[in-house]
Amino acid sequence: MAVYFDHNATTPIDGRVVEAMLPYLQEHFGNPSSGYRRGRLARQAVEMARENVARLVNVQPSQVIFTSGGTEANNLAIKSGLRGAGCLAVSAIEHASVLEPAKTLSEGERDVHIIGVDNDGLVSETFMEEVLLERPQLVSVMMANNETGAVQNIERLASLANAKGAVFHTDAVQAAGKMVLDFNALGVQMMTLSAHKIYGPKGVGALVVDRRIELAPQISGGGHENGCRSGTENVAGIVGMGKAAELAVQELSDRRAALLRLRSSLELQLAALSGVVVFAEAVERLPNTVFLAIPGIDGEMLLMELDRLGFEVSSGSACDSHKTGPSHVLMAMGVDDVLARCAVRISLGQDNTEADVDALVIAMKQQVDALHSNAMVAWV
Ligand code: PLP
């Protein structure tokens, strides 16, 4: 099997998570809304998972609303946070699941303001203060970017926005499990999480909310999830998310230390490749993420060659893989279009070893040498 280096796209499911889920796919198949024992068992499992997810971000369980993933949670936040004719502000580097609902709102004649980022991919206080002059009702800035890994100063940005009366939402899908997340200390009112980025199953996530926020349900029906998201609960998926959250809390410091060690080794070795540019290198990044470009080497081409050799990396956001052209994140950072097309993302995970990293760098070096010499031939 190929060596997997794309953990920001998705993570392999942890064996302990599968074990926790299995009974809820088999004998404990009850509907959590049913009053008899089998139903009650399913309900207990969902509520225990809610407690574990709440612990991951230090909130009360009643603040956790389970959804079908990060995309739905982002849609719920963006579509819920506005009342009357209020306007919205979102950063330019958000995931498509924030940018697309924002675009839909703007096409519906609602004012949507895009907050720019600096060359390191950060929303500066100045950019935030500028956008706050427009008096947005809701501001959405992600905790950490899926492509560069750059971590925003959410505590500061949320306090500026709150001081002007705006509700603050942060997409913490990539940050969860890789750094300490404290909803209250950050001062945000809504936060998005997704299970499959923390070694849990796909198709389950959560929106964490301040109890004072009145959500506008996007899926109505039987009034599940406190009336915020109807539909019979994905019990096994939710149990899996709960277990993944529990493990992420218990193992966070060990996971971070291991990832940081691997990343330093990777970056040290990559520095020997001529002209390598690491995006957002100067700022705090997720411990597992390296988004780089080797000038003159097309990112897609390098990805395909590495795939052939048994290494799975990404040329950017897997979730936007239908899109062609350079990354919108790099464009917002003012990166030159030609360099942006050379971008390759390596996102490490728990299953990677020092030997994997060494082998990847050797393969990259070989490919770079080969692609460079082909480019030279093409020039002649
Ligand atoms: N937000 C970010 C930052 C992401 O990276 C992703 C997925 O890649 C999502 C949201 C969407 O989450 P999901 O795949 O659970 O819908």
Image (cartoon, rainbow, N blue to C red):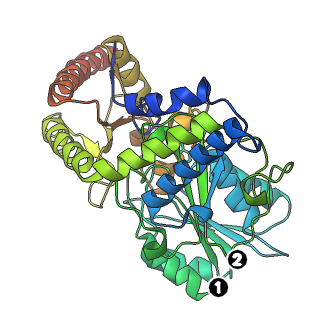
- Residue annotated with mark 2: 137
Q: Residue 194 carries which label?
A: none
For residue 210, say whether it is visible.
yes
Position of the C terminus, as image quadrant, is top left
Q: How far apart are marks 2 and 1 (CA)?
A: 7 Å
Position of the N terminus, as image quadrant, is top left
Residue at the image position 38 percent from the left and 56 percent from the top:
150
Q: Nearer the viewer, residue 36 or 296?
A: 36
Above-or-below relation of 224 to 275: below
Q: Is mark 2 within 8 Å of ligand 1?
A: no
- Residue annotated with mark 1: 165
State the SS at label 1.
loop
Residue at the image position 53 percent from the left and 76 percent from the top:
128
Residue at the image position 45 percent from the left and 59 percent from the top:
55
Residue 224 rendering spot, x and y as whole percentages: 76, 51
Q: What amino acid type should be assigned to the residue bearing mark 2?
A: Gln
Image quadrant where residue 165 sits: bottom right
Above-or-below relation of 201 to 77: above
Image quadrant where residue 191 sits: bottom right
Q: Do the residues labelled 2 and 1 touch (CB within 8 Å)?
A: yes
Residue 80 rendering spot, x and y as whole percentages: 75, 64
Q: Dot 2: within a 10 Å radius of its alpha carbon, few (fewer than 14), some, or many (20 or more) residues?
A: many
